[in-house]
Image (cartoon, rainbow, N blue to C red):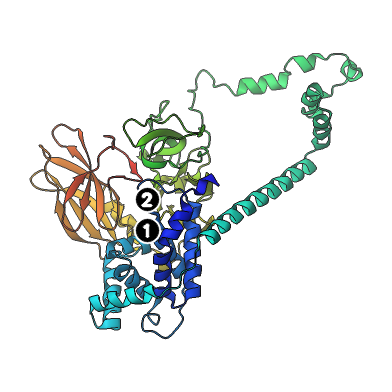
Amino acid sequence: MRRYIGFRDFVQRDQRSLVGTGLLLTGSHEQAIRLALRAYRTVGLAWPPTPWENPATHAHTALYRAFLRRPTAAGATALVRLPPRRRLIAVACLHDGRTPEEMADVLGLPVETVEAELTEALDTLTKGDRTRLVNRFATQAGEASVPDLSDRSLADLRGRGRRRALLTAAALTLLVGFIVMLTPQGQVWTTALAAGDRGSGASAAVPQSATASPGPSASGSPSAASSEPSESSASSASSAEPSRGESAQPAVPAAWKAPRTSYVIRYAVPGECRGARPATPAPGKVLCAGWTLTLTSDHPPKDRLDLPKASCTPRPCRATLHVPDAAQESGHGADGRREPGPAVSRDGRRLAYLSAAELRYVAHDLPSGTKRYLSPVLTPADVAGTSVAVSPDGRHFTVRLADRRLRTDFATGATAPVPAAETTPVEKSAGWLDEEYPAWTGSPGGRYAAVAVPGEPGNDSLHIVDAASRRVVRRLPLPPLGEPVSAEAVQWLSAREVVVELTGRTSRDILGFYRVDVRNGRMHRLAGLPADGRIAIGAVADR
């Protein structure tokens, strides 16, 4: 299959390292090979990788998650006696070279928790001797017996593709048969299609109650009712038109269907709102919809008729897509407005938003074209104060409603209320944060919130708030860019970087988007992003 070009070479090149990591985690060659095959299946389903994605890193991350879902341990070594999460952190950081910050992103934990687990593992295994433990891991992983996994990995992927195709065909066959069986005109339509008569097929498709008429028409002569609209249809058509005293409302946008593409979303910005909006909006009513996606790739979209023509000069190639039903403004309170924005996964492959067409949250996966519903149809009270967030790995989406939170696993499509025990400090303190700050954004682990507050002399500062204690734990002054600046925290790029939008206080111009290291306050510009007041950031290539 042309899709998997290069996959065999990747597996053969990476398998020794991956099986070695699995052997350290499980203590069993058999279990290590099973973990490696699961990881390669995950990578293969998303193959080919994006230009800035490292498939080896993706495979190791998939192996980590597969291990945590079903931890196993064989043997009686000190390593396998460690708790599964601590064992994983030790192996990933000391053998695979992952940093605590990277593992915090993978596991959805605060960096401090990962560092504490790593210290505990070092003290337990070698009484804090890091070099000794690194050498021990390298020796044990080097003893792994590694067969060639490339054929098994490819066979697994191809078998899954064939099974998916067969199941889809069977489901479609059953669905068509069910519809034909329940539809009163099903027998007439089937006869017309089998006869191949275009004219008879067209007439048979009209319900009999609409075509049959008494008198001359029944004997075969033309009927005036068949060529002229009836009084009832004319009255219903005229009733659909707005009266002179009413203003025409903008049409409800159609639900968006995502094209299948290997391009990834770099960022999304709101489109132009068409039509006049009411001076006093109804609470919970979507007032404006439409977001524009900018997608990027290092390869032109060959044979991709569902994508607009991409511009590849200069590289990377870029294309744009319009999502007409993505809500960007809704009524709130007596005369207020809210701005529910979309959420884009860090790899740019998935997009979630409030659909103005369906009045519920939806998520799309661009590589597969899969669509998931993240919430039921919302009530006005839900729409008035709602938002959506995506986990660092892009798998879980959390919808915040008026009185509850719903979490959806995109892989399975299962949606369930977020248990109280799994509610993060940021989620628990969301109401307080809304009251204290005009804008804030939660960290990937859910412990901290980043906010911009007025500072001295005239420049805003970036504050990092511990949501559990509701205390500011770090104050980072933002440097002036030729003039005093005001800032807004947009979103976290990782557990240690926050994107802020800077605006000149004097010129009122948007000066750009910058990523700020929350540990030391160092700031770097994010190039290639538009000077727009609202933005949702996805795959940032120069990150």
In the rendered view, would you say 227 is above or below 380?
Answer: above
**Residue at point 40% right, 54% down?**
55
Q: Quadrant of residue 103?
A: bottom left
Could you tell me the amino acid type at mark 2? Glu
Q: Quadrant of residue 16?
A: bottom left
Q: Which mark is residue 53?
A: 2
x%, y% of residue 207? 78, 29
Could you tell me the amino acid type at mark 1? Thr
Find numbered disc 2 in the image and state the secondary structure of the residue it sits on. Answer: loop
x%, y% of residue 194? 82, 32
x%, y% of residue 176? 73, 43
Q: Is residue 458 left or right of residue 295?
A: left
x%, y% of residue 136? 31, 78
In terms of depth relative to the viewer, which is nearer, 217 or 349?
349
Does residue 441 appear in the picture of this structure?
Answer: yes
Q: Are marks 2 and 1 in contact (CB under 8 Å)?
A: yes
Cα separation between marks 2 and 1: 8 Å
Q: Which mark is residue 57?
A: 1
Q: Residue furthest right?
A: 219
In terms of depth relative to the viewer, which is nearer, 454 or 542?
542
Q: Is residue 13 left or right of residue 132?
A: right
In the rendered view, would you say 311 is above or below 44?
Answer: above
Q: Is residue 198 left or right of residue 460?
A: right
Does residue 407 appear in the picture of this structure?
Answer: no
Q: Which mark is residue 472?
A: none
In the rendered view, would you say 387 is above or below 320?
Answer: below
Number of residues whose C-alpha sits closer than 10 Å to that of mark 1, classed few (under 14), some (14–19) or many (20 or more): some
**Residue at point 28% right, 50% down?**
440
In terms of depth relative to the viewer, which is nearer, 539 or 498?
539
Find numbered disc 1 in the image and state the secondary structure of the residue it sits on. Answer: helix
**Residue at point 75% right, 46% down?**
178
Q: Is residue 502 left or right of residue 285?
A: left
